[in-house]
Amino acid sequence: MAAIRQMALWPTLRSRSFALLVAAVAFSLIRARDQPGLDIGIGGTTATIVPGDLLLAALFVVALLLIARERPSRWTLAVIAAAGAFGLLVVGTGAVNGAASFVGGAKVMELAALGLGAMVLVRRERELEAVVDLLILFTIAADAVALVQFVRQGGGRQASFLGEHDFAALAILPLLYGLVLVHERRRGRRAALAICSGSLGV
């Protein structure tokens, strides 16, 4: 519990823009079908707008405003331009293949807002560790749910609240982070928390 109380996540939430990034990451880890949604008809298909969509859109706008204010380097602008061109290609390709493909492409490209937000808002080790903290907390919660499912169902792989493959993909991130800390011989309690939660999930 001490390791959880001392996480870097809590102080970073004082920044509204970083809190928005954390919220967007958190809602991206929750399946859309488990979030409340509003159905909107688009060209013969239905798009469901959930809170995660709104947070990603807000993060995208905030990131663009920060980029415009800070005047990033040419290299950063080149990366953003390349990613933007790829995003337009995905959405455009979907649009010419029908409304359902367009909605699917747009939903996939929403997640690019996470990358843009991370590029703009994660500048120091403290911010990186705050994002890792969130992943650790979600992994611990998923572990707890999966353990209950494991006992009730008499063994086997469990989906927790993520789906069994997404659960394993999430859990491996804290596991790898913990192994890096062990390799660097620092922060033993944090490394143990990350490795234990990640290993159990995987």
Image (cartoon, rainbow, N blue to C red):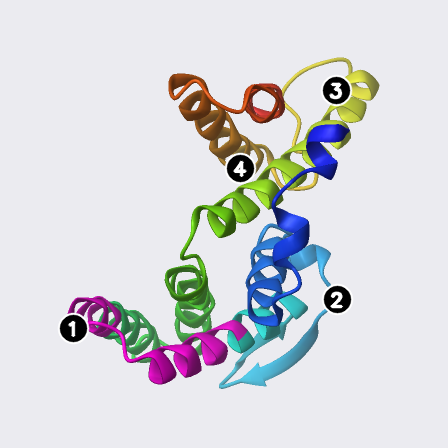
Contact flag, marks 1 and 4 (Cβ < 8 Å): no
Under mark 3, the amino acid is Phe
- Horizontal relation, residue 148 to residue 158: left or right: right
- Magenta range is 59-82
| Residue 143 colored in magenta in the image | no
Tag shown at residue 150: 3
Residue 130, percent across and down?
Answer: 56, 47
Q: Is residue 193 above or below residue 30?
A: above
**Label 4 belongs to which residue?**
170
Residue 154, percent across and down?
Answer: 77, 13
Under mark 4, the amino acid is Leu
Pair 1/2: label in front: 1
Distance, label 1 to label 4, CA atoms, is: 33 Å
Distance, label 1 to label 2, CA atoms, is: 40 Å
Under mark 1, the amino acid is Arg
Contact flag, marks 1 and 2 (Cβ < 8 Å): no
Q: Quadrant of residue 47?
A: bottom right
Q: Residues within 10 Å of mark 4 (few under 14, many from 20)?
A: many
Contact flag, marks 3 and 1 (Cβ < 8 Å): no
Query: Which quadrant holds the N terminus?
Result: top right
Q: Is residue 54 above or below residue 14?
A: below
Element on which disc 4 rests: helix
Pair 1/4: label in front: 1
Q: Is residue 192 above or below residue 41?
A: above
**Main SS class of the magenta portion in the image:** helix
- Horizontal relation, residue 188 to residue 36: left or right: left
**Label 1 belongs to which residue?**
74
